[in-house]
Amino acid sequence: MLDLNSKIPSGPLEQKWDQHRFSMKLVNPANKRKHHVIVVGAGLAGASAAASMAELGYNVSCFVFHDSPRRAHSIAAQGGINAAKNYQNDGDSVRRLFYDTIKGGDFRAREANVYRLAQVSVNIIDQCVAQGVPFAREYGGLLANRSFGGAQVSRTFYARGQTGQQLLLGAYQALERQVGLKKVQMHTFEEMLELVVIGGQARGIVTRNLLTGKITSHAADAVVLATGGYGNVFYLSTNAMYSNVTATWRAHKKGAAFANPCYTQIHPTCIPVSGEHQSKLTLMSESLRNDGRIWVPKKQGDNRPPSQIPEAERDYYLERKYPSFGNLAPRDIASRAAKEACDDGRGVGPGGLGVYLDFSDSIKRLGKQTIAERYGNLFDMYQRITDENPYEQPMRIYPAVHYTMGGLWVDYNLMSTIPGLHVAGEANFSDHGANRLGASALMQGLADGYFVLPYTIGDYLASTKLEKVDTSHAEFRAAEQAVRDRQNKFLGIKGKRTVDSFHKELGKVMWDYCGMARDREGLKKAIGLIQTLKQEYWENVNVPGSGDSLNQSLEKAGRVADFIELGELMCRDALDREESCGGHFRTEYQEEGEAKRNDDAYAYVAAWEYAGEGKDPILNKEPLVYENVHLSTRSYK
Ligand SMILES: Cc1cc2nc3c(=O)[nH]c(=O)nc-3n(C[C@H](O)[C@H](O)[C@H](O)COP(=O)(O)OP(=O)(O)OC[C@H]3O[C@@H](n4cnc5c(N)ncnc54)[C@H](O)[C@@H]3O)c2cc1C
């Protein structure tokens, strides 16, 4: 069993982070330049961590498989970033952001981490404004805010529907400044395929260059994985096509526990699936629910055009069921409500798998110009994809896989169960419990990178004895060989099915049995199906070409192999958790259609340990202790 010491500092909640920062050891400025830190990933979490560590004086090597850090999936983030600034004077505070996040996560996140997140949220906005991020402003010049799901205050800062892009440009500039100063060495087109552990500590990585196929070792004193989420295990998701689990999965197989893998966020407002050959789903930001009203016809099978359905025959089901939060009910709840309406035969559009998101009231109230200013790029995107004009007719939306709350287990210092391996952003199991509130992923990724890791990695380096290690160490040779062997194995199978066909099949199994609704029998069935799929994959996949040049089938083969193993673990995790909480909805555990938690038996983080090929993974439990909030049934009514 693993030692899951969360290292939560003692003392009152409000003072934990301050006291911890004081008690952590510092590396003196002259010694910082003697240390080398590897950061894998340059999305918001990785770029902010790499830039901040370099700014402090550490030598940083940053790796991405993209051609530029600016291609990271973070660039897709649309709606905004939360912070407890209380600019609106509408009752917000650090405490309220903390509470909303804990409650939004259905009481399955660590109190201390979430409180720290709320505390540093205010620093993030200052940092980004100083970098020149063009947040929307009010007429008088103050930063503007809008509301997101699960909150009754307006605390979301935004830059039209391009918040991620603008934040990433800020972080990227900070990173490039350090590249210019030669404190960061930027490695593009390099895919991390192995973590190297020496003497029980993470001491480096092995990468493959995607253009030349060259396999290289890189040594360091500490490694950060900021490699994003794994929603693409479902094949269809709102994630960028390249998002995958490989870096964290390979670290998992080297000893890093994987926490809460089954906690997946299904976002309620995505453009519905349109056909068999689709490979990507598109998000319509939650910010649209500030001004859009969600409804379906009251009558089953009513397929009149929306303009011909009178008000009295429409069911604004979120406003009806959750009057306090209305259209801004949290994502898990809004998604389930949409599914329920469609399952009831009241869905709209092809196949009845859609609900309306209607702006007509807001356009009447505020004018088209205001709506265009707020959401213009999202409306354009919708029109380009569907050929329907959302200014004139309601959008059609349906839930889709969007975010993964699970990830590598980390302690309060964001260190995994492998000493020296730190994990940031969506890649860690993070602060969102069983359901992430909107606009809080960007907040968490930047909190991790700008404000937490620069302290905690320093503490690790100052308090740990590190042997001198370079890439001539036998462990690097062994890791390189493992990468080569795996690659040759894929190329040698010469089977009949494409990598994509396996991915698609896996995605369907995951969606059908481990998606918006799950049950015992379905999950057991899925585990069997995935095991069979894995066997066939390794016998019948076809990876054409060679390993010594650009070969996208080969790249994908490795990622899908990891997705298949992860998919099985997700189903095992979902099977173990005999309760419903947040994004994990077990149909056996519900009360009047709402999720029914079981705090006595399941108030824990499930941290899975890899036990070896062909062996069942081992479940370790970190009990979640709540000293500052009362565990209540989540209500948005
Ligand atoms: C469409 C969409 C809209 C969203 N909107 C919002 C929003 O408005 N507000 C909000 O808070 N959240 C939003 N989110 C969620 C948020 O965007 C992500 O959770 C967040 O950006 C993840 O950032 P990250 O830095 O952890 O990872 P990413 O941005 O995914 O970056 C991962 C990095 O790791 C690198 N990488 C990965 N694997 C490897 C490997 N093996 N080797 C080398 N490099 C590797 C990649 O090159 C990349 O640089 C949205 C998500 C989506 C899909």
Image (spheres, helix red, strand yellow):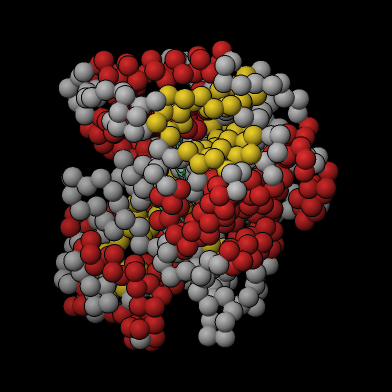
Question: In this view of the protein, can residue 83 be seen by the observer?
Answer: no
With 577 as the anchor, is 75 left or right in this view? left
Q: Is residue 441 above or below residue 462?
A: below
In front here: 322 or 4? 4
Residue 575 in which image quadrant: top left
Q: In x, y percent, where is residue 88?
A: 61, 77
From the viewer's side, name the closer residue of 568 and 548: 548
- Above or below, 373 relative to 76: below
Query: What residue sits 50% from the left and 74% below the top?
Result: 136
In the image, 180 versus 72, the foreground residue is: 180
The answer to whether residue 450 is seen in the rendering is yes
Residue 356 vs residue 27, the one in the foreground: 27
Q: How many marks?
A: 0
- Residue positioned 23% across, 61% down in the render: 385
> Which x, y percent locates residue 4?
67, 30
Q: Position of residue 144 (x, y in %)?
A: 54, 76
Q: In which quarter of the view is residue 622 placed?
A: top right
- Identified at 21% across, 78% down, the residue is 307
Q: Quadrant of residue 171?
A: bottom right
Quarter occupied by the N terminus: top right
Does 156 sit left or right of 278 as displayed? right
User: Residue shown at 47%/69% (left/top)?
Assistant: 159
x%, y% of residue 466? Answer: 72, 24
